[in-house]
Image (spheres, helix red, strand yellow):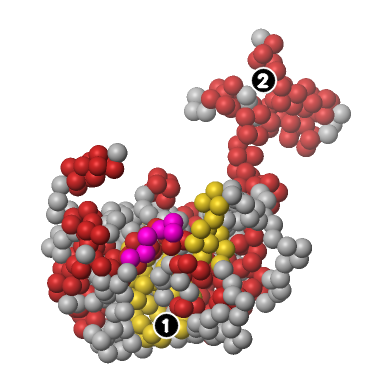
Amino acid sequence: MLDLLKRAIIPLAALVLSVILLVKSWIWLGLLCLAIVALGIHDFTQRRWTITRNFPVAGRIRWLFYQLRPYLRAYIVEDDLHGTPYSFEARNLVHLRARGETDTHPFGTERDVGAKEHHWISHSIAPESEPDESPRVLVGNEQCNRPYSASVLNISAMSFGALSANAVRALNLGAKRGGFYHDTGEGGLSDYHLEHGGDLVWELGSGYFGARDANGCFDPEKFRDTAAHDAVKMTEIKLSQGAKPGHGGLLPAAKVTSEIARVRQVPEHKDCLSPRGHSAFSTPIEMMEFVALMRELSGGKPVGLKLCIGQPHEPFAMVKAMLETGIRPDFIVVDGAEGGTGAAPLELSDWVGMPLLEGLVLMRNALVGAGLKDEVRLAASGKVYSGMGLARNISLGADWCNAARAFMFSIGCIQAQRCHLGTCPTGVTSQSPGRQRGLIPEVQGDRAARFHAHTLKALSEIVASVGFKHPTDLQPHHIMHRIGPEKAAPIDEIHTFLPKGILRDAPDETIYADWWRAARADSFRPAIDLIRIRASARGTAH
């Protein structure tokens, strides 16, 4: 009994206090205490929650702090460098650059330069005096007749629906004013994407939103009509994304308004889930043929592929299909498993897919090793927000980078992580008109453009310090990475970087020999028994 009294101390104390208050004619305070008593009785007798059944009213205090935990961590507990998914330092850097405030830092680095994850770029005694402060890359091989000059930093794929109308407006206005492109995401091309005339990359996922027939399959005529827009500079086939590879995009029913349903050509107020894979192709050869078809339908505009790298033989299957068919995509975007999304199963976000560094190196090696890198541009996407992030990815083989969450920060996102609930406090990911009201596209568009400009300025300073004009001159050996508390090495000593053409000429001399043999142009399934081969290889090593 004593234990029960201790656990029910709050409603019991409220009962005693209510009697005293009512006797003294403090009616409203007495009624408030009686309400706590009633809540305690409800908690004690309900059968759903153990914590409140055993600790009436007091158990709800735990719930309160559980709800407040993300905010307490973000604003009180976390240090500057270790918050997730983005640290305070990262978020603050984007916000400062977006607002045009100083991003200089006093008193030296706060990073632990002896930590195993620390890396740096090797500068030169002879720095470049006039680096390119707005570097661009020409995208489009000889099979493309309308090449596009892309900035080395662009807005990564985020769909209308996942983002609000005002967020799409702001990002596109930023792209227009800053001279970079805005990837539509797989949710279709909306009026908001076209409102300000910023350059667009139209992404087409397995749902073919905006270019689908009644059965959800690819509709060539609808694609041709939309791809003809002057603002659409390139099109992109989404194979997978880092946050949920092999799952398909998901837009919860609460966010599928009548307007979004019209843009996507799907039923309103129902979960909008893309299929796991494409229906327009099922083999590497068919994929390349679909690339050629999209390029023809778009009037010769560049066509690319976007994927998170998974099984290692599959990128090699793609390049074998390029070699066999003669068809070259104009670019490939590698999305790292650390990439973000509005909604994804936790296990897929945490455990499925290759992180950007490893995926980028593997795709780079597939293209270089097959002798295709000069024809197929390579882009990197996944947690990019700084000049150093750009420099590292470009050193590893990327021609440019895309960023999603960094641009969200630039237009007001505070990492509240309410994207999947439709209750974003800044209106970036909410379809609520009341919440979107706080996001003024004309103001936030300028901030996106400023963030882009200042980040490229930071990149140019890094590139100049190494002794180059353009970031594409950076090489893997310029990046040093710590591999222990007392040792560091150039990253080309940690990861393998293949020489040009070696996969065609001497694949058995590479670390990818098994994966190259497993790759086939006519199927994504391995051509050899990888279980037996890999077991044999391990046995030989021992």
User: x, y (%) of residue 395?
Assistant: 46, 70
Under circle 2, the secondary element is helix
Mark seen at residue 137: 1
Q: Look at the image and tell me whether residue 540 can be seen.
A: yes
In this view, the mark in front (2 or 1): 1
User: x, y (%) of residue 515?
Assistant: 23, 55
Seen in the image, is 314 located left or right of residue 450?
left
**Few, some or many residues within 10 Å of mark 2 (<14, 14–19, 20+):** some
Q: How many marks?
A: 2
- State the quadrant of the C terminus: top left
Mark 2 = which residue? 7
Say if 197 sits above or below 4 in the image.
Answer: below
Pick the residue in front: 525 or 191: 525
**Few, some or many residues within 10 Å of mark 1 (<14, 14–19, 20+):** some
Amino acid type, mark 1: Val
User: x, y (%) of residue 350?
Assistant: 43, 48
How much space separates mark 2 and mark 1, taking CA atoms? 67 Å
Residue displayed at 20% across by 72% down: 322
Residue displayed at 50% across by 82% down: 470
Pick the residue in front: 406 or 394: 394
In the rendered structure, which segment of residues is drawn in magenta? 493-498
Residue displayed at 44% across by 75% down: 400
